[in-house]
Amino acid sequence: MRSDLAIQTQALSKRYRLGSMRPMHRSLRESITEGLSRWRRTRATPTKASESEFWALRGVDIEIAQGQTLGVIGHNGAGKSTLLKILSRITDPTEGRVALRGRVGSLLEVGTGFHPELTGRENIFLNGAILGMTRAEVKSRFDEIVEFSGVEKFLETPVKRYSSGMYVRLAFAVAAHLEPEVLIVDEVLAVGDAAFQKKCLGRMRDVANHGRTVLFVSHNMAAVEALCDTAVHLDHGKVVQVGKPTDVIAGYLRGDESTRKTPLAERTDRKGTGVLRFTELTVQGPSTQHDIVRCGDEVKLQARYRCPHGPVKHALITMVIYTASGQCVTMLNNEMTGSDFETLPSEGVVQCRIPRLGLAPGGYTINVFCKVNHEIADWVQQAGEFTVEAGDFFGTGRLPPATHGGVLTPQEWRIAA
Amino acid sequence: MSSSPALDPRAHDVVGDRRVTMLVPRTGWSSIELGELWKRRDLLLLWACRDISIRYKQTALGVLWAVIQPIVMMGVFTLFFGHMLGVSKSTGNVPYPVFVFAGLLPWTFFASSVTASSQSLVANASILTKVYFPRLLMPLGAVGAPLVDMAVSFIVLIGMMLITGVALGWSLLWVPVLVVLVMLSSLGVGIGFAALSVSYRDFRHVVPFVVQVLFFVTPVIYPVSVVPERWRWVLSLNPVTGPIQAMRAAVIGGVVDTRSLVISLSVSLTLLVIALGYFGRVERRFGDVV
């Protein structure tokens, strides 16, 4: 490794088997029967996507010089989180290698290991140790941490009595005083009020000015532009562009023409008799922009189709939504809701309206499927994709943490007795 | 590249005074990095303290719970085994309650340590997927709270001995050593189960069951003398039999069965080595599977 580099990745690749990502609670019996059922499924639908392996990263070469601040941008599922996880040593690469110079601190979350029953003081020490500081280091920076967080008065109070703002401020304060040579940061700035965010950005700039290296992943283009001297755009596990943040962000927002998918009408990777063909699939929210919606939006999934042999009767139309990592989320189907399409004209659009979208932020793909007379008319996998941005689903401005499930459901709380 | 050979995937090179860490795919049985573990000893300590301080927070009786449990169990065993089944006749000069209590302390320590360390990884999955530290710290740190519980109960035991007139001997000085042996045997079992339960949630059901079975094949509520002589070695295959017997002998007096201690110790060290090997092998997958 060149002596001026802080991070160097060479042909870095990470493969997930979709099967091994899926089960959160695998049991021994499942493990034994899994092989069998997978084989059986393979027999039934040989084209099923879950059979394939999934490369979250493929041949990524990145060099970051010491003192540089690198912003990593890309769509959901582009491999950003996987890159962070490998650099933070949470997961091993499948191929390739990484060289890191100096101590690495990673902030994939603020307040990792915080315990609600412990006091602010106890949590500072515990969280500091989890992030990699020794007790002596925490002690020497203790006053600074407390001052930065602004919770001096509540140091001896269990953090479960903190407001969420205080909690986040304390958590970030500990993290901000971790002084590794390489700092890896994920979206943590998306928390707290505007004033505190500004403080955090300032703190990160300080870190970079002290010759430390920062790798920063964000959807917040403004933050990347303000903080980073270099940016890298990842797409489908590969590096698309590296360079000045303004250029890379422009490229990302423009979208690369050459990597854009074949239009649905021209896709040949489909099955079915062809009495009905889907030609376009769009996801429409309240804004004019296609395929980007927010949690809680009214969303319309619209499938344009053509029937070459004239109108069809009693078509059964199904759309299945998958997460970017291939997990099936839900199925939308006109038969289930009792909406019978007695006759579909030979050309038109079928629409499925979701009054209030209950999906967590992230990238999703849609498979479409149509049956006419109990025969598959058309079946296209990943016929469309859309992104869900954070939105105000509950009308409170709050969303569950990304680690706690991918589905939002309307809910009402009260004391029932 | 001033990198280290591929054989040693996590080796450090010193370039100037800034060390280079290499991350490459690991395969096969990789060893536990003791150096890394030592560097993070502060975390181990704070982690154990966390368990200890949250254990009795917001409970009215607090640390008394550490004592109440073994005392109630002692009462139950004294009534049923001591009196009704007549085991108390085989405990010699020592009153049966003291005999049982002296066995229950190390046993409770063993059982809670095994349970806590087995669950430590799954219970802290949200931390394991967010930050790196040697994963072994979790099952190791889980032993802290049971250790403190035992220390508290030990004071009660000494009190009971003073009241019932059982002599306190110099052999009490062996207790710390024997506690370490009990800890080793619980870590062997606990670390193994911790690693297994990451991939197979079945072990959530297996662990309590194993602990319960072990209780009856460990001479806690009965003296080993009730077991026919030629079968006693079987009891010693249980990694915790030797240390518990020796600990009771050290506390309330009696002969230490060295053969049993050596057998138990060999079994528990073997288990520990296997568990550590397996742990090191699956450790790198925790981030993906947990």
Image: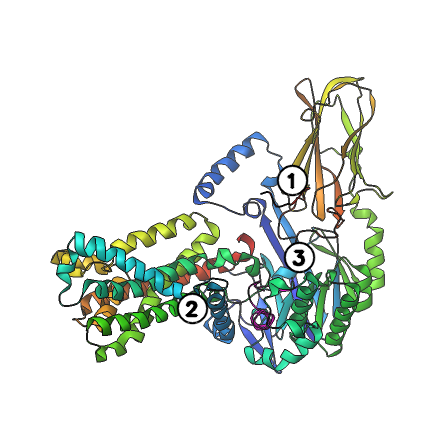
Q: In this view, does A224 lie to the left or right of B259?
A: right
Q: Give the range drawn in magenta.
A: A110-128
Q: What residue type is labelled 3?
A: Ser
Does residue A89 lie above or below A20 as drawn? Answer: below
Report the mark closest to the observer, 2 or 1: 2
Q: Which of marks 2 and 3 is in front?
A: 2
Does A22 appear in magenta?
no
Query: Picture quarter containing residue B94?
Result: bottom left
Which numbered disc, 3 or 1, marks the residue that appears first in the sequence?
Answer: 3
Residue at left offset 80%, top offset 21%: A308
- The residue carrying mark 2 is B144
Residue A329's mark? 1
Whether residues under marks 2 and 3 lie with C-beta atoms below 8 angstroms apart, the answer is: no
- The secondary element bearing badge 3 is classed as helix
Residue B251 in view here: no
Are both tags, 3 and 1, on one chain? Answer: yes
In the picture of the structure, the residue carrying the numbered disc 3 is: A81
| Pointer 3 chain | A
Mark 2 neighbour class, 10 Å CA radius: few under 14, some 14 to 19, many 20 or more: many
Q: Is A116 part of what is drawn in magenta? A: yes
Along the line of sight, the residue nearer the viewer: A333 or A306: A333
Where disc 1 sits, the SS reads strand
**Residue A356 x/y as whole percent:** 75, 39
- Separation of disc 2 and disc 1 at Cα? 42 Å
In the rendered image, which quarter contains the N terminus of chain B?
A: bottom right
> Residue at 66% across / 59% down in the picture?
A83
Where does the image place residue B76, in percent across and percent down from the top left? 26, 55
Which residue is depicted at the point 13% across and 65% down? B92
What residue sits 39% from the left and 60% below the top? Answer: B190
| Of B115 and A103, the residue lying toward us | B115
Q: In this view, does A289 lie to the left or right of A197?
A: right
